[in-house]
Amino acid sequence: MALGCAVLWFSSATALFAGPIGAAAGFATVLPATTEPFGMVASAVVSGPLNDKWLELAHRLDDEGVQLALCDGDRERCASTAALRFLAIVDQARARDGRARLGEINRAINLAIRPVSDLAQYGEVDVWSSPLSTLRRGAGDCEDYAIAKYVALRQAGMAADDLRIIIFRDTIRGEDHAAAAARLDGHWLILDNQRMAMVDDANARSLRPLFIINDSGISKYDDRQHFATAQLAPERVAASRDPIAIAE
């Protein structure tokens, strides 16, 4: 697994998706209304290896939530250095509002974790770690960053409905990738471990979204919408507030 985070379990689902972002000038379709990142509809995934992996992680997140609550209530007696480090990040975020809160989490998690592939760290090709496990090691790959940011933002007070973990295909690097996403003032911002700047989803032109994860579970994007989404992209980009391309 490369640093760009090639998600190897995705290979079993590649038949569900096809085609790059982009469409002929005459292509047009009607998109159903959606509030998901990238303005696309996603349908629930209720079985399969990806769903099993998320359910397993969700149980560990529940356990860590109890540990974090206990440490937050009595930090002097907290025996977990990782929990105290995580709570310190959350404290800094809680002291800020809006975009500054998102930026604090993005920056702090990016600096707290050293990028290392699962193969190098565990000898396995795809391991999803909980935030405290990742902080104890001080290393992880893209989905570990995304998971840690997702949990940190929840702890900092953001509503679950405004948070996502998204699995993409990076069409420039030619590999799969994961990042957290947060909704602020109606805009979805991508919190990526590969950059400190947060990027509006409308400007993430090189990222083709595949799967989306939140507290409700996993959903997959309908790839047929990519052509129509690309057709709408110039208008969305013009209206966005952060004109930074996702890939430099």
Image (tube, rainbow, N blue to C red):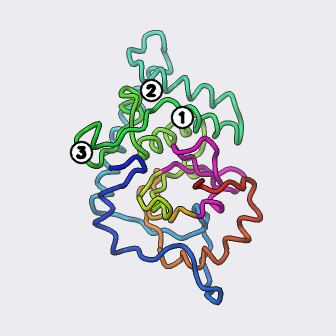
Q: Residue at x 36, y 31 (%)?
A: 133
Q: Residues within 10 Å of mark 3 (few under 14, many from 20)?
A: few
- Residue 32 image point, x, y percent: 59, 77
Residue 61 visible in the shown view = no
Q: Is residue 130 left or right of residue 160?
A: left
- Residue 201 image point, x, y percent: 62, 59
- Earlier in the chain: of badge 1 and badge 2, it is 2
- Residue 216 image point, x, y percent: 45, 55
- Earlier in the chain: of badge 1 and badge 3, it is 3
Circle 1 — which element? helix
Q: Which residue is mark 1?
A: 155
Question: Observer-nearest residue: 230 or 183?
Answer: 230
Vertical placement of residue 232 versus 170, above or below: below
Q: Residue at x 47, y 73 (%)?
A: 222
Gap in angstroms between the C-alphas marked 2 and 3: 28 Å
**Residue 68 tag number:** 2
* Residue that extends furthest to the top in the rendered view of this protein: 76
- Earlier in the chain: of badge 2 and badge 3, it is 2
Circle 2 — which element? helix
Range shown magenta:
179-205
Residue type at the position of mark 3: Glu
Q: Which residue is mark 3?
A: 124
- Residue 68 image point, x, y percent: 45, 26
Gap in angstroms between the C-alphas marked 1 and 3: 30 Å
Query: In which image quadrant can residue 167 be found?
Result: bottom left
Q: Is residue 94 left or right of residue 206?
A: right
Vertical placement of residue 37 versus 18, above or below: above
- Could you tell me if the residues under marks 1 and 2 are in contact, i.e. CB atoms within 8 Å? yes
The residue mark sitting in front, 1 or 3, is: 3
